[in-house]
Amino acid sequence: MKLIFVYNANSGKLNGYLDSLHKVISPKTYPCSLCDITYGVLKIKPEWQSFKDNTDLDLEFHHLDEFKNKFGADARARFTYPIILNEENNVLREFISKAELDNLKNEKELITLINLKTTGL
């Protein structure tokens, strides 16, 4: 099983700067709860980095444009972002939905949810 994290943002330095600015100026309208949970204004949150570095799970991360390039426009259109997908046998399934991500308060809650869902599989 591989978990694929798809941020509701495009890749690139300019997009990163604009996203950071959006987080500061209008955090309530920022469209990527996964970005907000795992990253501060300029860098990854330490507890999230530690989880990524120490987990035995197979994790893959994409921005919207990267996801579309790898999996195609049809896959891109099937889901609402941000999202965490489960890829098994080349099939993508929702693992943690946008709604679930939107309800999380911080990276600790995300880590707990991932651990609960992966140990239950």
Image (cartoon, rainbow, N blue to C red):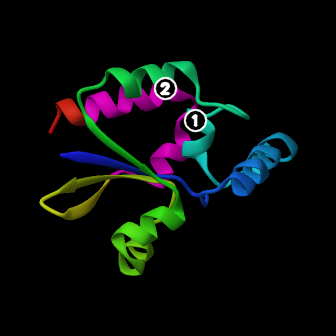
Q: Is residue 52 above or below residue 46?
A: below
Q: Amino acid at mark 1?
A: Ile
- Is most of the magenta stretch helix, strand or loop? helix
- Residue 96 visible (yes or no): yes
Q: Earlier in the sequence, mark 1 or mark 2?
A: 1
Task: Please tell me whether mark 2 sits on a helix, a strand or a loop.
Answer: helix
Q: Are marks 1 and 2 in contact (CB under 8 Å)?
A: yes
Q: Position of residue 77 (x, y in %)?
A: 44, 76
Q: Is residue 33 above or below residue 47?
A: below
Name the residue that disc number 2 marks. Answer: 48
Q: Position of residue 84 (x, y in %)?
A: 39, 50
Number of residues whose C-alpha sits closer than 10 Å to that of mark 1, classed few (under 14), some (14–19) or many (20 or more): many
- The extreme right residue here reads 25
- What residue do we see at 78% from left, 53% from top? 18
- The extreme front residue here reads 13
Q: Position of residue 29 (x, y in %)?
A: 76, 53
Name the residue that disc number 1 marks. Answer: 37
Toward the viewer: 35 or 120?
A: 35
- Residue 79 visible (yes or no): no
Dividing the picture into quarters, in which one does residue 71 lie?
Answer: bottom left
Q: CA distance from mark 1 to mark 2?
A: 9 Å
Q: Amino acid at mark 2?
A: Trp
Q: Is residue 54 above or below residue 8?
A: above
Toward the viewer: 30 or 5?
A: 5
- What residue do we see at 18% from left, 30% from top? 119
Q: Judge whether residue 18 is colored magenta.
A: no
The part of the chain drawn in magenta is 95-117
* Horizontal relation, residue 40 to residue 103: left or right: right
